[in-house]
Image (cartoon, helix red, strand yellow):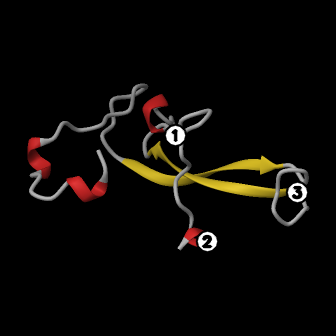
Amino acid sequence: MEATNMKGLVPSDLPDVICNECGNPTFIQVVLLKKVSAALAPSGNTSFLPLPVFECSNCGNVNDELLPKEKGASLPKTQDDN
């Protein structure tokens, strides 16, 4: 669901996301780095693409549903995109 369509939702009415490994309901944001080869990078130099993901605050697991989608999916915006 896109953020623009969330108006009027009541958070307490929505299901919680829990860790698939330990059942914990809290997460912290961490950064997954993807290496971009010099051939693909706009600068012509090897660089890194930061992807924000959420990790369980108890055991460190990242649920599959919280990972960026592969092939053809749009990537999360970074501060440089603004």
Q: Amino acid at mark 1?
A: Gly
Mark toward the start of the polypeptide (2 vs 3):
3
Dots 2, 1 in contact, CB < 8 A: no
Q: Amino acid at mark 2?
A: Asp
Counting every numbered tag in the picture gives 3
Give the side of residue 44 with respect to residue 69, left or right: right
Q: Secondary structure at mark 3?
A: loop
Residue under label 2, please give it. 80
Identify the residue at image location x=53%, y=60%. 77
Q: Amino acid at mark 3?
A: Thr
The image position of residue 28, as x and y in percent, is: 44, 52
Which of these two is toward me, 13 or 61? Answer: 13
Give the side of residue 67 with respect to residue 16, left or right: right
The image position of residue 61, as x and y in percent, is: 50, 35
Q: Which quarter of the picture shows residue 56?
A: top left
Which of these two is toward me, 29 or 7? Answer: 7
